[in-house]
Amino acid sequence: MNSPLQESAPSAFLPVSLIALSSIVLLTWNLIIVVNQHYNGVRISAQQEIQFAQAVQAETKLKQMMSDLVDLAKTDTDAETIVKRYRIAFTPPAGNPETPAPVKKAPAKDVKAPAKAPVKAPAAP
């Protein structure tokens, strides 16, 4: 009635195929998460670049406004009041070619020229 081939042990195909299928699902899910994280990172990086450019632009405008206010304070009493009240002091950056830094001159009597050392002739061989 039953042959010895039909009474064999249960097949291992079903458990192996279930493990393989679950591994494929898990790896696919991980791949989707990694791709989404990469996309979000690129998007956030682009937003940060835009925000940085806006911050630099705002800083430049603020520095220009401060410079104008300090210059105006020399002639206008209201501007001078604002500058004194908020203790605003503006000094242009050292490397700015548009507005060179003022040169401090020392009194002429304090300045001495360095003494020149005598030049020696090279020794003959």
Image (cartoon, rainbow, N blue to C red):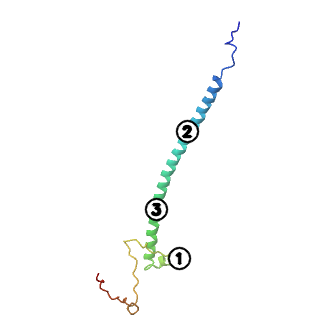
How far apart marks 3 and 1 lie (CA) works out to 23 Å
- For the residue marked with disc 1, what is the amino acid? Arg
How far apart marks 2 and 3 lie (CA) works out to 38 Å
Q: Would you call the spot at circle 3 few (<14 residues within 10 Å), some (14-19), or many (20 or more)?
A: few
Whichever of labels 2 and 3 marks the residue nearer the N terminus, that label is 2
Quarter of the image for the C terminus: give it: bottom left
x, y percentage for residue 89? 49, 76
Instruction: Examine the rendered structure and indicate whether residue 113 appears above or below residue 50.
Output: below
The answer to whether 105 appears left or right of 40 in the picture is left
Q: Secondary structure at mark 3?
A: helix
Whichever of labels 2 and 1 marks the residue nearer the N terminus, that label is 2
Quarter of the image for the N terminus: give it: top right
Instruction: Examine the rendered structure and indicate whether residue 64 appears above or below residue 15.
Output: below
Of tags 3 and 1, the one toward the viewer is 3
Query: Where is mark 3, residue-wise?
Result: 56
- Residue at 41% in and 91% down: 110
Query: Where is mark 1, residue-wise?
Result: 87
- Residue at 47% in and 76% down: 79
Of tags 2 and 3, the one toward the viewer is 2
